[in-house]
Image (cartoon, helix red, strand yellow):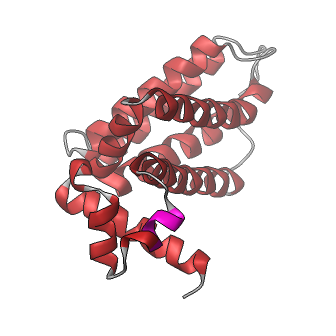
């Protein structure tokens, strides 16, 4: 198995452990056992549990970025369509990763260096979304608007993932939140 293939296998197995046993059960030793390899092989990919958690979040972030780009490539160039694409991609990614994403995100918040990584990743995602929405705004969208939009995105997605909210309702509410947030900063007639 190539190094890249092994890395992918370990990340996939780590997600499985988190899904089935919870984030606390994810250790490098547990991962080695699940993969049927020795701990030194796992340590050569992830020097610490923190590095493994970051790798999981990086994998999620890459999936979310790809879903966002694909959704936006498939829609018309209008605020409503872009907002719906962002909403759908965000909710679907969180629902797909379910409760295991919440566990990984919580673990990332637990240590300062991991929290810094998550904040940087969240800021990069916010900037990507902003770049797709700003053509409909007069000037730059304020950080407060993007914070509100992404806070709503995370909350609605978590409720949908937990089964407390229908996915379509989450799409609709998030789309409306995005459109309303951008419209507060739009030029007349642009949407």
In this orientation, does residue 173 appear? no
- In this rendering, position of residue 75 left or right of residue 106: right
Report if residue 174 lies within the magenta region: no
Please report the residue visible at 56 percent of the width from the left and 35 percent of the height from the top. Answer: 117
Point out the image quarter for the C terminus: top right
x%, y% of residue 96? Answer: 37, 57
Q: Is residue 71 above or below residue 153?
A: below
- In this rendering, position of residue 102 left or right of residue 151: left
Q: Is residue 160 above or below residue 5?
A: above
x%, y% of residue 45? Answer: 52, 65
Please report the residue visible at 44 percent of the width from the left and 51 percent of the height from the top. Answer: 48
Q: Quadrant of residue 122?
A: top right
Q: Quadrant of residue 80?
A: top right
For this rendering, which residue is in front, 98 or 175? Answer: 98
| Residue numbers of the magenta segment | 41-45
Report if residue 43 lies within the magenta region: yes
x%, y% of residue 69? Answer: 67, 52
For this rendering, which residue is in front, 111 or 19? Answer: 111
Q: Is residue 77 above or below residue 96?
A: above
- In this rendering, position of residue 184 left or right of residue 44: right
Q: Is residue 8 above or below residue 173?
A: below
Magenta stretch, main secondary structure class: helix
Instruction: State how many labels appear.
Output: 0
């Amino acid at each position: 198995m190539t190094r890249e293939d092994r890395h992918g296998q370990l990340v996939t197995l780590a997600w499985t452990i988190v899904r089935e046993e919870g984030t606390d059960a994810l250790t490098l030793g547990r991962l080695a056992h699940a993969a049927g390899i020795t701990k030194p092989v796992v340590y050569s990919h992830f020097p610490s549990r923190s590095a493994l958690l970051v790798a999981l979040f990086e994998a999620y972030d890459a999936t979310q970025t790809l879903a966002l780009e694909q959704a936006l490539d498939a829609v018309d160039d209008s605020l409503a369509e872009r907002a719906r694409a962002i909403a759908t991609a965000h909710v679907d990614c969180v629902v797909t990763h379910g409760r295991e994403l919440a566990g990984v995100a919580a673990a990332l918040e637990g240590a300062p260096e991991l929290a810094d990584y998550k904040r940087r990743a969240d800021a990069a995602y916010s900037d990507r979304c902003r770049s797709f929405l700003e053509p409909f705004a007069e000037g730059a969208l304020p950080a407060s608007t993007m914070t509100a939009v992404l806070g709503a995105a995370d909350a609605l997605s978590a409720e949908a993932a937990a089964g407390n909210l229908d996915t379509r309702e989450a799409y609709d509410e998030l789309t409306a939140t995005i459109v309303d947030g951008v419209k507060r900063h739009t030029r007349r007639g642009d949407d």
